[in-house]
Every structure is written in structure tokens, then in C-alpha cells.
Image (tube, rainbow, N blue to C red):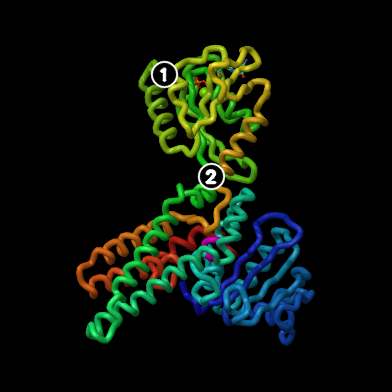
Amino acid sequence: MNNNQTIFAPASAAGKAGVAVFRISGCEAAQAITKLCAPNDVPAPRMAMLREIKHPVTGDLIDKALVLYFAAPHSFTGEDVVEFHTHGGRAVSNAVIDILQTLPNYRLAEAGEFTRRAFENGKMDLTEAEAIADLVHADTEAQRKQALRQMGGALGALYKNWRVTLSRGLAYMEAAIDFSDEELPADMVEKQNVELRKLRDAIAAHLNDNHRGERLRDGFSIVLLGAPNAGKSSLLNALARRDAAIVSPTAGTTRDIIDVHLDINGYAVILADTAGLRIGENDIENEGIHRARARAAQADLKLVVLDGTAPDDETKKLIDENTIVVWNKADISQPSTTEPRALPISAKTGAGIDALLQKIGSEIAQRFDNQTTPPLTRARHRAALEDSVAHLDRALAAPMADMRAEDVRLAMRSLGRITGRVDVEDLLDIIFRDFCIGK
Ligand SMILES: Nc1nc2c(ncn2[C@@H]2O[C@H](COP(=O)(O)OP(=O)(O)OP(=O)(O)O)[C@@H](O)[C@H]2O)c(=O)[nH]1
Ligand SMILES: [Mg+2]
């Protein structure tokens, strides 16, 4: 990737729309205006101006557009940035892109390249850049809020503070190595150890969060479980409001796991339909049952479906504290008093489905709400934090001051990789690949 080149890209989605936004960034960004609009008419920075966009060679009028100029470093990328807000038709877009491509030293941006330049120019740390990708991909309210909070720098600030605490500790440790004992307060090592342990415990507590931030981002997983014919697939369809899974009176209909994505009270949910649990009639059904059990073991919440017309004890054995139980086929059966926890529903008529959705919503909210510290949102952060705890454990157990200092240095390095303040060159391609073109 060549940062000396000026990059451009459509920043709005392709297709017909009222307006299309083109973004241009780099030291020659202003050329887009002087070549396409007027040679001596770059608008004052941050002032929107209506201009004619013309073909630089033929002089053909392409469109009338709003033109904005942001002078470095006061722009999203920290470079000179130009935006054209044209009309959003395909022909206009194609013409603008074709012309920009002919300008010297201009090239189409790669996915995430604008944000990458912003990161490289110190406009944001990596957690904030990742939050932008999350915000662009957010489908639900909870995802949007989490991304916004991270974009505000809450997560980056937390990790940065930990790193600052460590660097302060390290300074003392290095002093202890460099100076002889009598020049330093006697309890200094002890004090440092207390600080290190406090920080180690804070990071461990942050890690021990049930993966809630990652779940909020990736989706909360709920699995439907029950006997064959209990009505699991019917319930999946009722909750998804579409015919996602095959329903039939034949026991053993579902084999493969069927996932549907739902938005329940603003939370992203992945609901999985599974094979009815019994001793299967053949290898295929048994494989389906095996998969159902495996998925149940990883799920955040189990939705156990009792067949109201034949509530069986095997199904009841699946119920634990992480379960919502429903009494299905309540339209043709009488809910039993022996199962007071079971919510009566009918997947067929839709009775009780709203109450079930409410119950699911409150179960999820209970797990996510009332959080004071910003949640950990990515496996990448988790791995770095785990690394850093391991180094701190080693530092606390180190028999010699210089070994301890080295482990603290490594713990700091792991924390620094999260925000991108230390060597992360190898990570950048992976992180920014997640983005859209134009972001
Ligand atoms: N009356 C009534 N019938 C239902 C209800 N829910 C499901 N059924 C019927 O029960 C039968 C089985 O439904 P499915 O949804 O396929 O059951 P399943 O649990 O997915 O079954 P397997 O995939 O075989 O494990 C079908 O004939 C449905 O129409 C309900 O609430 N009331
Ligand atoms: Mg089924």
C-alpha cells in the first residue's frame, strides 16, 4: 500500500439513491476540485459549495454537486480530504470514478484505507478504528450503542490507563535495578508488588465477563431443544416470522442446525433449530442429535420445548438454570401444574409468542445491563489481555528484579498492541480488511 498516493472511493452504497458521496484523501486531494470544477476555486475548508462537475478533457457537464474541502490535519484521515456529494445514479457514479482514475497519482482506495490512514496519522487508536467498523455493521440498537461507546474511546482509555500504571511501576523497578539498596525506600518493592497484583486482578476481572461484549457484537446464541415433534421448528418459524425450517408431523424432520438471526429488544440473537433428541433411527439423524447437543453446550441460553400433548421426562432433564421452558401446543393441551416454569404457547396459533419474546428479552438484558466498565468486544483484545495477565503472573513470581521488569515490559507490550501503540504492522491488514471500501 502506497501512502503517497491520493486515494478515492464512493463512500455511500452503490445503486440508485438521492445522493452519492465520494471521498478523496491525500496530498493531492484538492486537485479533484481544480480539475473537475474550476482551476482556481477550491472552497474554504469546511464550507459546503455547490459546483458544476465537468469532464476535465471534454468539458462535458457530469452533474452539479456539493463540494467540501478539509485541509490537513483537520480531517477524518488527517490528510487533505475532498468530498463530492453528487446525485446518486449509477451513470453519475461511474463517470466520477472514471475521471478520478485518470488524475495523476490517484487510485481507488482499498477496504478500510481511509480509517487506516486516520489511525496511522494518530487520529484514533485501533479500538476506535474497530468501533467504526462495528458501527457500520451494527444491525441492532445494542450493537450500535456498544460501537458508539467504543468509538468514543472508552475501551482505549481503559487499556491506556493500565499501560500507564505499568510504565510507572516499571520506572520504579528500573530504578531499583540501577541504584543500590540504601538509596531507595525499603518498602518500594513491596508497594510495587501490591500495585502489580491490583492491576493483574483488574485485567482478570475484565476478562471474566462471560464474553458479553463479544456476544453483543456477534449475537447472543439461543438453541431450541426438545423431543422430536415437540414443535421446535414451528416455534423457530413463529419467532422468525418466516418459514425458515421445515415443519412436518413426521418425527425426526430436522437434522441440520438451522440458524436464524433475530433482533430481540435491540439485541442481536442467533436462534438455532436442532434435531429432536431421541435415539435416532439412522446415522444421519444421530449425527443431527449429536450436533444439537454440541450446540446446546455452547449456547448462551437454552429454549426447551415440551410437547404439551406428550411432555416427556427426557426433555425435562435438559432444564437447568440457563433455560427457558415452553409448554407448546397449548391450543390442544392443558399446561400441567407439575411444570410451573413452563410458559404456555402455541407455535401454531401464535398464542404466548409475545410473552415468550418478552421473557427472552429480559433474560438477555439481565446479562448485558448495569455494566460500569466498557465491555471487551473482540477476541483480538481478549488474547492480548490474557497474554498480559500471564506476563504479570510471571512478574509477580519472578525471583529477580530484572526478570520482573522484563515481564512487566512484555505485559505493557501486550496492552499496547490492543490500542496499536506498539508494533502492530502485522495486525493492520487483518483489522482493516473488515471494513467497507470508502471507510
Ligand atoms: N396443534 C399444534 N400443533 C403444533 C404446534 N406446534 C407444532 N405443531 C405440529 O407438530 C408437528 C411437529 O412440528 P415441528 O415443528 O416439525 O416439530 P419439531 O420439534 O421441529 O420436530 P423434529 O424436527 O422432528 O424434531 C407438526 O405437525 C406441527 O404442525 C402447536 O402449537 N399446536
Ligand atoms: Mg424440526
At 71% from the left edge and 74% from the top edge, which residue is drawn?
Answer: 55
Image vertical order of residue 159 relative to residue 147, above or below: below
At 60% from the left edge and 57% from the top edge, which residue is drawn?
Answer: 136
Mark 2 and mark 1 residues within 8 Å of each other at the beta carbon: no
Q: Which mark is residue 278?
A: 1
Q: Where does label 2 land, which residue?
A: 367
Instruction: Determine the CA span between mark 2 and mark 1.
Output: 31 Å
Q: Looking at the picture, how far across and down is residue 404, in whole percent?
A: 26, 70
Q: Is residue 410 magenta?
A: no
Q: Looking at the picture, how far across and down is residue 278, in whole percent?
A: 41, 18
Name the amino acid, label 1.
Arg
Q: Nearer the viewer, residue 52 or 309?
A: 309
- For label 1, the crowd category at 10 Å Cα-Cα, with few meaning under 14, some 14 to 19 and many 20 or more, is some
Image vertical order of residue 58 relative to residue 330, above or below: below
Q: What secondary structure predominates along the stretch shown in magenta?
A: helix
Q: Which residues are magenta?
A: 128-132
Q: Quadrant of residue 186?
A: bottom left
